[in-house]
Structures are given as C-alpha cells and as structure tokens.
Image: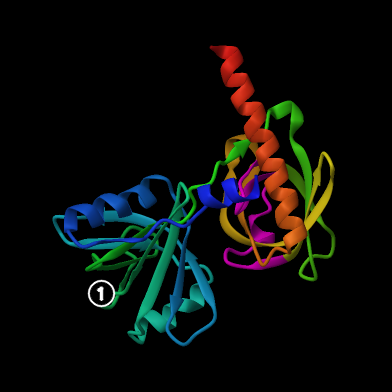
Amino acid sequence: MSNAINAEDAPQPPKVLTTPMEISSTLGQLQDSHDPLIITFHERTQRFQSYLVDVNREAGTIVFDEMIPRDGERFLLAGEPYKVEGFHDGVRIAWESNGPLTIDTSDDSRCYVGPLPDEVVYHQRRNAFRAALKLAQLIDVDLDGEKFKAPIRGKLLDISATGCKLRFDGDITGRLQLGQVYDRFVAALPFGSMTAPVELRHLHFEEKISTTFAGVRFHNMSGLVQRQVERFVYQLQREARRFDKDDL
C-alpha cells in the first residue's frame, strides 16, 4: 500500500517555460484564480505576500498587488533582486526578477509594475491521489503551536500523502501567514488522532460564506504519521472506487 501511494506521489520533473505565450498564459492562471504569491529577496529571510493583478503579453509587463507587509517596498526601491513563488492546482509556478519594479498609485490603489519574466519554472510536484471527504464526514482538525494563544479549530476537506485542504469558520487570515510552519496540526482520523507540523501554502477568505480555506503541506512527518496518512488516503481511495462502481 505504502509503495503504491509513494509511486503515485513521485515528484514530476519541472518544466522551464521560455516563450512569452507560455509564460503569460501560465501567469494568467495565477491572476485569474487569485492565487497568493510569496515574494522573497536574495539574502533576506522575510517573506512577503502579493497577487498578480495584470499580465500583459503585448506590453511584456506584469503587475503585482500591494505587498503584505508593505515594508518590503524599500527592497523594491533599492532594486534588490527577488523571487516569486505561487501554487495553482498543485503546480508550483516560480520565477526570478527580470528587472526592477516601479510603484504605481494612479488608480487610487498601490501596485508594482515590472517586466514579464524571461523564464518560469512550472513544476507538478504532487501527482498523488487527493481524496475528498463527504460533507457529512468532515474530520475535525486543530491548528496549534507556540504562535497561537489557543488552537484554531476547523474541518478537513481533502487529503493526499503530501498535504491537505482545510476549512475554518470566519476570517482567520489575519492570524496566519503564508510560508509559516505550524508545529501542531492535529486531525481526528477515524482510527486515531495524527499530529504533525504543517507549512501553510494557500490561504483564502470567501466573504460570501464567511469561511477561510487553507492549503497546508505536511512538514518533516515522522514515519508513524506518514503511515497514518497513507492508510487514511488509501481507505478513502478504496471508498471512492467502490462508489464509482456503484454509479456504473
């Protein structure tokens, strides 16, 4: 069982996109889905969050939304090289700066305009079966650690051998930070609770339903926890296949 899941989860080799059409199309996916981006500057450990608000292949430009926290602007103004990383449907999309960004405040909003990157790394790192739970069977989870005064309680929506998607009531985006590792993630699996550190890779608040969705990746799992996750994913996979057969 473990070997089968590990084989499915084997990393796929990265592709390097080099044509303006490929690059603009791929970055357009990040823009359309409003996927959060993590910006880092060389030789600095702090991470900044932003979004793509425009990708213009004809003009050869991209536009980022205001950086969070905003003090990263001083690195931009100093012309420091930066890296950008985002995730779209399990695919890592990353690139490095191709010239300085300029600050634009013309539309009563703050954004940064820069050149389209020369190349973009497109890396399908997860090819694992991602098992979705039925609404009636959602599992309780706690996100906890030294950074919290109290655990944040939510629900597990889906899970794979490498990570999972979570749902929380209300807007908790101010309490979490992309790229941060939280050392106590607890999920009440049917055969016993599992506890593991997780890295926050995606965060989105859906205002219409007052719900926050988060995507996390398991971080330095122990062998015991990895076997728990694989067992649960395998169990959900078997159930999904059984229901598929029933439908036929």
Q: Nearer the viewer, residue 113 or 218?
A: 218
Residue 98: where, in percent of width, then height?
25, 74
Asked if the magenta segment contains residue 215, the reply would be: no
The magenta-colored residue range is: 157-182
Tag 1 secondary structure: loop
Q: Nearer the viewer, residue 178 or 72?
A: 178
Residue 131, placed above or below residue 120: above
Q: Amino acid at mark 1?
A: Asn
Q: Which residue is pictured at 46% across the width and 87% down the height?
A: 43
The quadrant holding residue 16 is bottom left
Q: Which residue is pictured at 32% across the width and 84% down the height?
A: 79
Residue 56, placed above or below residue 131: below
Q: Nearer the viewer, residue 3 or 52?
A: 3
Residue 45: where, in percent of width, then height?
54, 82
Dot 1 corresponds to which residue?
98
Q: Which residue is pictured at 31% across the width and 61% down the height?
A: 63
Q: Nearer the viewer, residue 182 or 39?
A: 182
Count up the numbered dots: 1
Image quarter in which the N terminus is found: top right
| Image-based side of 212 in relation to 17, left or right | right
Mark 1 nearby-residue class (10 Å; few <14, some 14–19, many ≥20):
some
Q: Residue furthest left?
A: 58
Q: Which residue is pictured at 73% across the width and 64% down the height?
A: 222
Residue 113: where, in percent of width, then height?
29, 67
Asked if the magenta segment contains residue 161, the reply would be: yes
Q: Is residue 110 visible?
A: yes
The quadrant holding residue 130 is top right
Residue 226: where, in percent of width, then height?
70, 56
Q: Is residue 196 visible?
A: no
